[in-house]
Image (cartoon, rainbow, N blue to C red):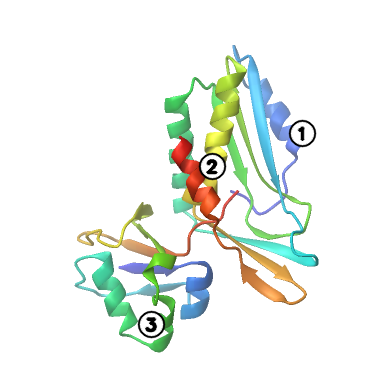
Amino acid sequence: MQEEAFDLGAEVNDFTSRQSGMGAVVSFTGIVRDIAAGLEAMQIEHYPGMTEKALAGIAEEASARWSLGDVLVIHRHGALAPDEMIMMVATSSPHRADAFQAAEFLMDYLKSRAPFWKKEVTRDGADWVDAKDADEDALSRW
Amino acid sequence: MDVLYFAWVRERIGRPKDNIETGAATVRDLVEELRAREARYEMAFADLDALRVAVDQELADFDAPLAGVREVAFFPPMTGG
């Protein structure tokens, strides 16, 4: 968890250099998208303490399901501008299928089981982003 | 017991946290106690289907028992990632 921006290239390079015997590293990055024209900021609130526990639990679950070397999750909070990077996950595994699947699993769970809330600030005011049914439904495939 | 509020629940109630003495047996009982406090609590807890709850920082349901619990949090469905 951090408020400041992260360097995606440096994080992935550092993560990759710490692996040994792994044939694959997969990374995913989430970016603030200007959905309603005129998005001024995306505010991300979280629940300090529970957030870290929830993320660790999701990473442990991924490690139990797939053969993984390591998992990295970085998630920002506070006010972010359009096109800024919100979060990233990286996974490593001996073969790519595990790293890809684990990264998707992490994203699906992180979207609706980790205590984050997004608020969009536009010229017209600020509104909380509603959770999507599709995000909840995505969990059923695991 | 600490009762925490996040996102629009926090905004409707107008504060991030209450420290309360309660004999509530379950989360649902605690919600009833809070609703009886003031209109802004009634408004925040009007539709429980729109809310999620965590008990001692673990997701729980509204029937979860509160014996020995130190922290309960109420918030809307999460929107991470």
Local secondary structure at mark 3: helix
Label ID, residue B80:
none
- Most extreme residue toward the bottom is B39
Furthest residue in direction top, as rendered:
A21
What chain is tagged by disc 3?
B
Say which label, 2 or 1, has the lower sequence index: 1
The number of discs equals 3
Q: Position of residue A98 (x, y in %)?
A: 55, 22
Which of the 4 image quarters holds residue A121? bottom right
Residue A36 lies left or right of residue B46; in this view the side is: right
**Marks 3 and 2, how far apart in space?**
33 Å
Mark 2, residue position:
A108
Other-residue count near label 3 (Cα within 10 Å), few / some / many at <14 / 14–19 / ≥20: some
Which of the two discs, 3 and 1, sits closer to the camera? 3
Residue shown at 45%/65% (left/top)? B75
Q: Residues within 10 Å of mark 2 (few under 14, many from 20)?
A: many
On screen, residue A52 versus residue A9, left or right, reads left
B20 up-or-down from A75: above or below: below
Q: Nearer the viewer, residue B26 or B67?
A: B26
Q: Position of residue A22 (x, y in %)?
A: 60, 15
* Element marked by disc 1: helix
Where is mark 3, residue-wise?
Answer: B42
Q: Residue A20: percent from the left, percent from the top?
A: 60, 14
Q: Which kind of residue does numbered mark 3 sit on?
A: Glu
Q: In the image, which disc is placed on residue A9? A: 1
Q: For the residues labelled 2 and 1, say whether their Cβ atoms are less than 8 Å apart.
A: no
Q: Do the CB atoms of the residues marked 3 and 1 lie less than 8 Å apart? A: no
